[in-house]
Amino acid sequence: MNTPANVGHPRSAAALRSVRLLVTGYLAISVLTLIAIVVMRNDATAVNPAVWTRGTIVVAAATVTFLLARSAARGSRGAYRRLRIVSAVMLVAIVVIIALPGTFPLWMKSEQAVCGLLLLGVAVLVNGKHLRSVFTD
């Protein structure tokens, strides 16, 4: 169905506003992390190839998540479905990153934990009964 979901109800608007706020925080932290990686690039203990790769991927994923959240807030059912998937997949990836021994420095695992908490909030909201009912086809 191509008709937009009715996201005008105050409860729906509030939930989607919270999602956008959480995703904006995730994007901001991700961009700041990439800036930190560039600044610390000459410190091999703080920035290794895995950090460069993960930092770049996270900024790309956070940008996609931001765009999906924006579209979902406008009523896009497809964006909402993709937001549900992306937030869950990225949350699992973050848990794996934190659990991997030795690959990532503590500073990056800490940053990923913060991102994970933000995405957990997104996942809880977008998978909640209310928003699921709003976006049901």
Image: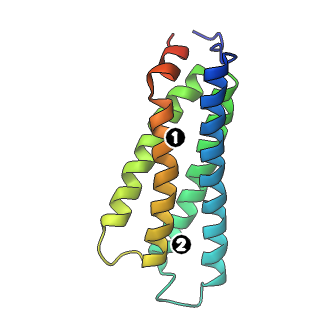
Counting from the top left corner in percent of width and height, residue 27 is at 63, 54
Q: Is residue 101 left or right of residue 70?
A: left
Residue 76 x %, y %: 63, 22
* Residue displayed at 50% across by 20% down: 130
The x, y position of residue 77, in whole percent, is 58, 20
Give the amino acid at mark 1. Answer: Val
Q: Earlier in the sequence, mark 1 or mark 2?
A: 2
Query: What residue do we see at 51% from left, 32% from top?
Result: 82
Mark 1 to mark 2: distance in Å? 25 Å
| Residue to which mark 2 is pinned | 52
Which disc is residue 122 wearing? 1
Quick one: label 1, few (<14), some, or many (20+) residues within 10 Å? many
Residue 19 relative to residue 122: left or right: right
State the SS at label 2.
helix
What's the image's color scheme? rainbow
The quarter of the rendered structure image containing the N terminus is top right
